[in-house]
Amino acid sequence: MPEYRLSPAPALGPGAADRIEVGSYGIEENISIAIASVASRSCRSKDVRAVLRQILKCDAPEAGAFVVGGGYRAFWTGPDQWMMLAEHENHELLASELKERLGETASVTEQNDGWVCLDVTGDNLPVVFERLTVADVWKLESGSAVRTVIEHIGCFLICVEQDRHYRLLAGRSFAKSFHHAILTALRSTQLLYPDSK
């Protein structure tokens, strides 16, 4: 019997996910990430955290934190709730993998088709994001994650590398509007600060 593998489909549509350069900035859709949510069940928080510690090779992140470990990434979304990320190529069935490890201690939900993931890179990016969100991006250090709003769209803003690399997750149905808002801010900032490094 042949083995079938699924290929992730860009939320922005074919070709639109390609990297766009705007001066020293860049934006692209990241379609290589598998996503699953984990929510501890009643009175099972310690059990869930113990398993996540084994998976992540570190403690599960608390509010405002984003961690990387064991080939996985995770950030806090609420009390005893996390979003887990991994490379799609190696963890196509991420939710199933996590459910097998966590058993009845947590509710695990497949999130792959629910989000658009954008990577924004460049120098001095807080100058861009201060035009988009009320979150204090200037204070976000590498390994931080906050829930915020951009152009009336709720999203998660992850600081991968302070000032230089931010990853954003928003509802897939808002993908094109979300991408357009950020791209517009990149272009306007580049016009204002053409020599910004």
Image: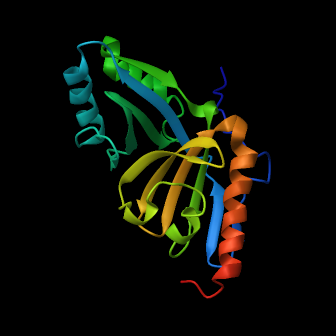
Left or right, residue 79 beside residue 113: left
Residue 194: quadrant of the picture: bottom right
Residue 99: give x, y in percent of width and height.
Answer: 40, 20
Residue at 55% over, 43% down: 155
Location of the N terminus by quadrant is top right
Q: Residue at x 62, y 72 (%)?
A: 25
Instruction: Specify whether 147 is left or right of 177.
Output: left
Residue 150 x, y percent position in the rendering: 61, 50
- What's the image's color scheme? rainbow
Q: Residue furthest front?
A: 134
* Front residue of this view, candidates 97 and 60: 60
Residue 147 horizontal/vertical position (percent)? 47, 43
Q: Is residue 2 visible?
A: yes
User: Total of numbered circles in the picture?
Assistant: 0
Q: Is 15 left or right of 61, judged from the image as shown?
A: right
Q: Is residue 112 above or below residue 136?
A: above
Residue under the image location 56 percent in, 44 percent down: 169
Residue 19 visible in the snapshot: no
Observer-nearest residue: 98 or 192? 192
* 9 w.r.t. 195: above or below: above
- Check the image and report above or below for 7 versus 119: above
Q: List x then y, in percent, for residue 119.
A: 57, 57
